[in-house]
Amino acid sequence: MHPSIRPAVLLIYLPLVMGHWSLNTLGEATLTQGASKPEQQIVASNTNFAFKLYQILKADSGNLFFSPFSITTALSMVLLGAKGGTRSEMERVMGYSNIPSIHEHFKRLRTRLTNPGNEYLLRIANRLFGREGFNFNQKYIDDSGRYYDAPLDLRDFRQTSATTRYINNWVEQQTNNKIVDLLPNNFIDPQLILILVNAIYFKGTWASKFSESSTLPQPFFTSSFNRVNVPMMFQRQSFPYGTSSLLNCQILELPYHGDASMVIFLPDQIDDLGHLERSLTSASVVDDAISSLWDQTVNVYLPKFKLSDMRLDLKPVLIQMGMSKMFRVREADLSGIGGNRGDLFVSKAIHEAFVDVNEEGTEAAAATAIGVAFESVSVVPDFRADRPFVFLIREKTSGTVLFMGRVMNPLA
């Protein structure tokens, strides 16, 4: 091995959420019936990880959208081959330190989430693209297939254009051609040994659809001094709803067919967004907030929006969260994947997402933490999302946060 070239591992996360005009009706969801305690611990740890991640990502201005579940899935595939201090650090940051047989229970959770009997469609695809000629650990290959359905696809990385095109085509197929040309032609470099890719595709339709005829141009205030006109959807219907004096926000849950829903946290005032975001810190806050909602008739005004090209460089974010060892040249211990301690390190961690919300449905997810106090009102409340808001998409029975985001401008 040339002393100036260190083998590298590349992580790519590809969540896709998209609203569609046709209903894909499958069976009734039975997601987490009989879920084990370790599975519940994984859900709680993943949600806490999501909010820690959000606290860092929110510093950037503009729209934000990502899939915590996609990120933790890809990281778990790395964890499968991590050893020593690299493994213990990853487990600590991800909250997995005290969860037994993590990969076996992660597999069971993923199987429940992608149950073909669900009324919504959730497709999770994993794949390992490896450099031909590298001696991968056979146990890692076997375990990746066993726990994550991630087969090893050996490619000639010297043929950079052909390999790039091959991987991009696979990504397009898994995301219904919504994420295209993910890797630029000069992306694969001589260091790369393994590219781990996770793609998530979610398709859901509202349990109560918005009528197209009720969608009208309405103002959306991007700040106290600026506004844009957006297509604003409307319906009056009974939904789980509440207000929080602690968070200074309204909370609305819009269910999809099956056991999935979008939860929206709408600040009382534009200037309250920062306070709301700082308060979304843990799984318990979000769970307490959502469990306190109760069904009541609400006038719902929600803008149509599509967030694309939501690409994140997660390497500095994960390092800031305390997960740095796996990125260190000659220090990372990924010898479970192949080679010896210090031979492999993670060079890049990329996340790209897409979400489309319209009258028929949506796909997205997020997590939020709030203590909620509610009071009954005799008039029909307005939930008018005409200012920046936070939203999440989750599987309701397990509480798994599939996607999370922030809309600052529906037209951006």
Image (cartoon, rainbow, N blue to C red):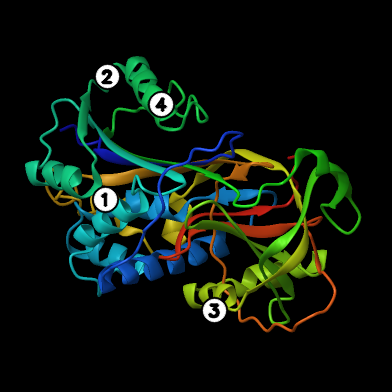
* Circle 2: residue type: Arg
Of marks 4 and 1, the one in the foreground:
4
Of marks 1 and 2, the one in the foreground:
1
Q: Are marks 3 and 2 in contact (CB under 8 Å)?
A: no
Q: Residue at x 19, y 70 (%)?
A: 100
Q: How far apart are marks 4 and 1 (CA)?
A: 24 Å
Q: Is residue 343 visible?
A: no
* Circle 3: residue type: Asp
Q: Name the residue under label 4.
A: 173
Q: How far apart are marks 4 and 3 (CA)?
A: 38 Å
Sequence order check, earlier mark of 3 and 2:
2
Q: Is residue 385 left or right of residue 228?
A: left
Sequence order check, earlier mark of 4 and 1:
1
Q: Residue at x 39, y 22 (%)?
A: 169
Of marks 3 and 2, the one in the foreground:
3
Of marks 3 and 1, the one in the foreground:
3
Other residues around mark 2 within 10 Å, as few (<14) / some (14–19) / many (≥20) = few
Q: Distance between the residues labelled 3 and 2?
A: 52 Å
* Circle 4: residue type: Gln
In the rendered image, residue 2, in percent from the top left (x then y), is placed at: 19, 32
Q: Mark 3 points at which residue?
A: 288
Q: In which quarter of the image is the C terminus?
A: top right
* Circle 1: residue type: Val
Q: In which quarter of the image is the N terminus?
A: top left
**Residue 19 or 408: which is nearer the viewer?**
19
Q: Mark 1 points at which residue?
A: 78
Q: Distance between the residues labelled 1 and 2?
A: 24 Å
Q: Distance between the residues labelled 2 and 4?
A: 24 Å
In what element is the residue under mark 1?
helix
Sequence order check, earlier mark of 1 and 2:
1
